[in-house]
Image (cartoon, grey):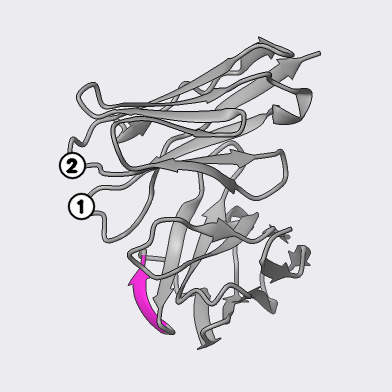
């Protein structure tokens, strides 16, 4: 059983919609990550939060907006997405930013129509 | 040259045999390595990590690291059909800003 949860499991949205992905971890970790994964590719890092502060933004388009309300929660706000943004969005956490042992949530399968 | 390289496979292994998954890396500064298992449509699951040269065993899994040869491997003993998945190798390097450097993954198929 994963201790990183993500909602929703699946999301279909139009290009004009606004939606949010949610992630929660119950391990007391202080670093949280958003990844994007396309089929047959490894995960691609999008954002890193460390102690609730954004520490890495991998040049992600502004239509993706992360938010970390507290040390257990991580959101990804989506607006005006493109069909090529369709992917599996993964949340992960680690003890802290310098700890490479990252534990993934089950992911949200996003389809943009 | 990719920083972490894996053969994409598929690697087909008969049930009960040893599956050997390999990963090479280009940066001699890389310090630690992680093996993730990913079932189709699911998220990656951390199964092993190794920091030091040599072998590390955990149940049916053995990770091997050879820093001189810049080579990492994962052995799965007594392979089961449930081991069929994509195995991702990820490494670190000192200037990676604490990011994992991912290989493309090897698809493993265990044939009953």
Residue B11 placement (x, y as % from top left)? 60, 16
Residue B64: % across, % down? 40, 27
Instruction: Determine the CA span between mark 2 and mark 1.
Output: 6 Å
Q: Is residue A44 above or below residue B24?
A: below
Q: Which mark is residue A10?
A: none
Q: Is residue A86 visible?
A: no
> Quarter holding the C terminus of chain A?
bottom right
- The correct choice, above or below, for A55 with respect to B92 in the image is below
State if disc 1 and disc 2 touch (CB < 8 Å): yes
Residue beneath the point at 59% across and 58% down:
A104
Out of A40 and A73, give the one closest to the viewer: A73
> Of helix, strand and loop, which one carries label 1?
loop
Q: In which quadrant is the N terminus of chain A drawn?
A: bottom right
- Tell me the tag on residue B94: 1
Could you tell whether B46 is left or right of A83 in the image? left
Q: Of the numbered discs in the image, which one, if any, rests on residue B29?
A: 2
Pinpoint residue A87: horizontal percent, then vertical percent. Answer: 63, 53
Near-viewer residue (B51 or A42): B51
Q: Name the residue located 26 percent from the left edge and 54 percent from the top edge.
A: B96
Q: Is residue B2 above or below residue A89?
A: above
Residue B68 position by quadrant: top left
Depth check: give the residue in front, A93 or A55: A93
Q: Which of B90 and B17 lies nearest the eye of the viewer?
A: B17
What is the magenta range?
Answer: A53-57
Would you say A107 lies left or right of B98 here? right
Give left or right: position of B95 versus B12: left
Residue that lies at the very extreme toward the bottom in this rendered image: A69
């Amino acid at each position: 059983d994963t201790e990183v949860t993500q909602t929703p499991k699946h999301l279909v949205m139009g290009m004009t919609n606004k939606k949010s992905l949610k992630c929660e971890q119950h391990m007391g970790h202080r670093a949280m990550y958003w990844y994007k994964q396309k089929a047959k590719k490894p995960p691609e890092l999008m954002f890193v939060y460390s102690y609730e502060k954004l520490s890495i933004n991998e040049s992600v388009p502004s239509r993706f907006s992360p938010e970390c309300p507290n040390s257990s929660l991580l959101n990804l706000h989506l607006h005006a997405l493109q069909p090529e943004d369709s992917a599996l969005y993964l949340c992960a956490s680690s003890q802290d930013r310098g700890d490479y042992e990252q534990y993934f949530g089950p992911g949200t399968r996003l389809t943009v129509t | 040259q990719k920083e972490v390289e894996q053969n994409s496979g598929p690697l087909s292994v008969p049930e009960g045999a040893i599956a050997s998954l390999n990963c090479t890396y280009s940066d001699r500064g890389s310090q630690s390595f992680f093996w993730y298992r990913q079932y189709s449509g699911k998220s990656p699951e951390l199964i092993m990590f190794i920091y030091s040269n040599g072998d590390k065993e955990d149940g049916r899994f053995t990770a091997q690291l050879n820093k001189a040869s810049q080579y990492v491997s994962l052995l799965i003993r007594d392979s089961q059909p449930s081991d069929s998945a994509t195995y991702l190798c990820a490494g670190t390097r000192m200037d990676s800003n604490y990011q994992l450097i991912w290989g493309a993954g090897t698809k493993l198929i265990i044939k009953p």
